[in-house]
């Protein structure tokens, strides 16, 4: 939705700006800036410095009609397969992996008909971890293997 897209754009702008001024010796760091100017914004700090995604990406829930649910479930299946294929094709850079995981989590948040035992937490944690990394960083062998296993097990649970 519009709110989520606007938040994602602002978070990206924040990260770009913060990276640009981080090299300035006069800038003490975002956390110190917040403390020095007595800013009381714990949720903003969490979104900008912690998870790196809007709350709606992690906690969203939407009620859809049955026909829309089928389309959304199909879209989620597409994102599961795409995310797994990216890793199997040995694409490891954060900017190659993160967009697929982000789209998968957003789509799963729209799904009403997910099995009661289905847990999105692992995928949400991966999204937070990927958002905390630089775009040029690459996942190591252990991370790729774990993410692939988490995707495969989540996909199996999603299908059931």
Image (spheres, rainbow, N blue to C red):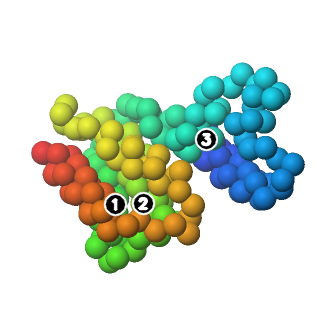
Mark drawn on residue 100: 2
At a point 59% along the width and 37% down the height, the residue shown is 47
- Whether the residues at callouts 1 and 2 have beta carbons within 8 Å, the answer is no
Q: Is residue 2 visible?
A: no
Element marked by disc 1: helix
Q: Earlier in the sequence, mark 2 or mark 3?
A: 3
Point 76% across, 54% down: residue: 22
Q: Which residue is mark 3?
A: 49
Which mark is first along the chain, 3 or 1?
Answer: 3
Snapshot quadrant of residue 31: top right
- Residue 4, placed above or below residue 71: above
Residue 8 appears in the figure: yes
Percent x, y of residue 88: 28, 73
Q: Position of residue 44 (x, y in %)?
A: 65, 32
- The residue lying furthest to the bottom in this view is 89
Q: Quadrant of the N terminus?
A: top right
Give the Cα distance between marks 1 and 2. Answer: 16 Å
For discs 1 and 2, the disc positioned in front in the rendered view: 1
Residue 7 to residue 97: above or below? above
Q: Secondary structure at mark 2?
A: helix
Q: Position of residue 114 (x, y in %)?
A: 24, 38
Question: Separation of disc 1 and disc 3 at Cα?
Answer: 22 Å
Give the residue number, with chain letter if any, for mark 1. Answer: 143
């Amino acid at each position: 939705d519009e709110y989520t897209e606007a938040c994602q754009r602002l978070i990206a702008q924040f990260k770009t700006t913060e990276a640009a001024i981080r090299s300035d010796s006069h800038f003490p760091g975002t956390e110190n800036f917040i403390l020095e100017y007595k800013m009381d914004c714990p949720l903003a700090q969490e979104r900008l410095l912690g998870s790196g995604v809007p709350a709606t990406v992690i906690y969203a829930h939407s009620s859809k009609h049955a026909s829309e649910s089928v389309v959304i479930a199909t879209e989620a299946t597409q994102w599961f397969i795409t995310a797994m294929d990216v890793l199997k094709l040995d694409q490891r850079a954060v900017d190659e992996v993160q967009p697929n995981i982000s789209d998968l989590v957003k789509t799963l948040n729209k799904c009403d008909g997910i099995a009661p035992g289905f847990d999105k937490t692992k995928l949400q944690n991966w999204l937070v971890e990927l958002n905390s990394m630089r775009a040029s960083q690459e996942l190591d062998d252990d991370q790729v293997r774990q993410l692939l296993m988490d995707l495969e097990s989540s996909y199996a649970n999603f299908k059931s």
